[in-house]
């Protein structure tokens, strides 16, 4: 069974924001979902792809 951190929002999210994503880290993947629809679709990314995304986002 794969362990994960549990879902959390960014520290940059505000209480009244409707555009929040939640993230959880697992051993080999990073999962992302819409905070307003927690039972809805989820996206899973490899840890490597997630690091690449963050690196790119930090540049912009």
Image (tube, rainbow, N blue to C red):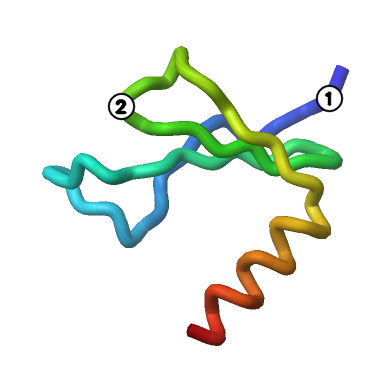
Vertical arrangement, residue 24 with respect to residue 49, above or below: above
Quarter occupied by residue 52: bottom right
Vertical arrangement, residue 56 with respect to residue 27, above or below: below
Residue pointed to by mark 1: 2
Residues at marks 1 and 2, CA–CA distance in whole angstroms = 25 Å
Q: For the residue labelled by badge 1, is the local secondary structure a helix, a strand or a loop? A: loop
Q: State the image coordinates of residue 22 (x, y, percent, origin top left).
A: 46, 39
Point out the frontmost of discs 1 and 2: 2
Residue at 36% x, 31% y: name it.
35
Vertical arrangement, residue 43 with respect to residue 51, above or below: above
Is 51 left or right of 10, judged from the image as shown?
right
Q: For the residue labelled by badge 2, is the local secondary structure a helix, a strand or a loop? A: loop
* Residues packed near mark 2 inside 10 Å, few (<14), some (14 to 19) or many (20 plus): few
Q: Earlier in the sequence, mark 1 or mark 2?
A: 1
Which one is in front, 6 or 32?
Answer: 32
Report the disc number at residue 11: none
Is 46 left or right of 36, judged from the image as shown?
right
Quarter occupied by residue 29: top right
* Residues packed near mark 1 inside 10 Å, few (<14), some (14 to 19) or many (20 plus): few
Q: State the image coordinates of residue 38 (x, y, percent, origin top left).
A: 42, 20
Quarter occupied by residue 15: top left
**Mark 1 touching mark 2, by CB under 8 A?**
no
- Quadrant in which the N terminus is drawn: top right
Report the disc number at residue 36: 2
Residue at 57% x, 27% y: name it.
42
Is 33 left or right of 53, judged from the image as shown?
left
Q: Total label count? A: 2
Residue at 20% x, 52% y: name it.
14
Residue at 73% x, 44% y: name it.
45
Query: Extreme top residue here?
Result: 39
């Amino acid at each position: 069974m794969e362990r994960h951190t549990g879902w959390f929002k960014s520290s940059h999210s505000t209480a009244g924001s409707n555009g929040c994503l939640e993230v959880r880290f697992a051993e080999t993947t990073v999962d992302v979902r819409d905070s307003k629809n927690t039972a809805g679709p989820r996206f899973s990314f490899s840890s490597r792809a997630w690091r690449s995304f963050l690196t790119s986002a930090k540049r912009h």
